[in-house]
Image: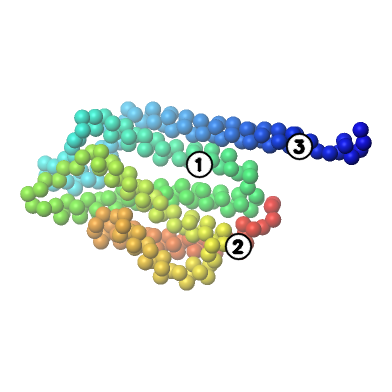
């Protein structure tokens, strides 16, 4: 056997190593997913005994503003049992989100460059915190104002009694919508980091951002001016926060740097 023959790479070896690498990544992904699911299940099991109390707390903003004698109702036979369990599941997801994001980060981070990790870590923490802040803002400020408006405009002779399942769906939709809308700074930083926009374009586009914020607020909030203002104004402020974050965190071509 000649030197050239012994130095020739074996295509089969490269293929086997590629398959082994892919298999190891799939195994790690399965492990991360199982850990996330296990966390959600454990939290759910801990919350099930308190499911009815959780629903009472969730319904408090509406119940406190219902007319005298009005109350929530269940229009389906299984609603009094199923609806609190659904809320317990949503709460378990909400509580477990830091663990789920950590598992996602642990799976993805080995493939990132150092400069990408430096930007991704604060963005993940900020995204999680802003989503929670958006949900809290909706629960403590927006929902009471919206229900005050809705009960005030109820026609005379009509008794307002909301189904518990419909109420849960409405509140969860509001939480999700406000949580996503509060991600404006993160979205602005990501767009700037990948080069879609720069700081000058963000500053010159303020007027369009304001119009867009109030258009989104008009679409997803209840039909009263108070709720729309309570979402539109924070979105504008969060846009300005995103502009400041771009100025501090994002350097031109930051994601195009050489691997660190």
Q: Can residue 135 be seen here?
A: no
How far apart marks 2 and 3 lie (CA) works out to 42 Å
Q: Secondary structure at mark 3?
A: helix
How far apart marks 1 and 3 lie (CA) works out to 38 Å
* Relative to 59, 23 lies left or right: right
How far apart marks 1 and 2 lie (CA) works out to 26 Å
User: Is tag 2's residue or tag 3's residue first in the polypeptide sequence?
Assistant: 3
Q: Secondary structure at mark 1?
A: helix
Counting the numbered discs, the total is 3
Q: Are marks 1 and 3 in contact (CB under 8 Å)?
A: no
Label 1: how many residues lie within 10 Å, few (<14), some (14-19) or many (20+)?
some
User: Is tag 1's residue or tag 2's residue first in the polypeptide sequence?
Assistant: 1
Q: Which quadrant of the figure has residue 77? A: top left
Which residue does the numbered mark 3 point to in the structure image?
11
Label 2: how many residues lie within 10 Å, few (<14), some (14-19) or many (20+)?
few
Looking at the image, which residue sits at the far left?
157
């Amino acid at each position: 056997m000649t030197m050239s023959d012994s130095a020739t790479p074996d295509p089969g070896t490269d293929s086997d190593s590629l398959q082994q690498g892919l298999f190891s990544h799939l195994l790690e992904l399965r492990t991360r997913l199982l850990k996330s699911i296990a966390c959600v299940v454990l939290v759910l099991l801990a919350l099930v005994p308190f499911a009815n109390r959780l629903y009472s707390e969730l319904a408090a903003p509406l119940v406190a503003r219902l007319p005298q004698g009005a109350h929530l109702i269940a229009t389906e036979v299984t609603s009094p049992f199923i609806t609190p369990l659904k809320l317990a599941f949503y709460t378990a997801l909400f509580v477990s989100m830091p663990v789920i994001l950590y598992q996602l980060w642990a799976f993805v981070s080995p493939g990132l460059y150092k400069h990408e990790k430096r930007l991704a870590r604060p963005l993940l923490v900020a995204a999680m915190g802003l989503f929670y802040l958006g949900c809290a803002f909706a629960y403590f400020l927006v929902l009471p104002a919206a229900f005050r408006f809705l009960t005030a405009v109820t026609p005379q002779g009509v008794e307002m009694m909301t189904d518990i399942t419909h109420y849960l769906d409405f509140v969860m939709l509001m939480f999700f919508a406000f949580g996503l809308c509060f991600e404006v700074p993160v979205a602005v930083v990501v767009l700037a980091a990948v080069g879609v926009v720069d700081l000058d374009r963000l500053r010159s586009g303020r007027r369009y951002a304001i119009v867009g914020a109030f258009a989104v607020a008009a679409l997803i909030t209840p039909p009263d001016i108070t709720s729309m203002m309570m979402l539109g104004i924070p979105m504008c402020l969060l846009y300005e926060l995103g502009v400041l974050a771009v100025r501090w965190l994002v350097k031109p071509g930051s994601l195009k740097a050489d691997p660190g």
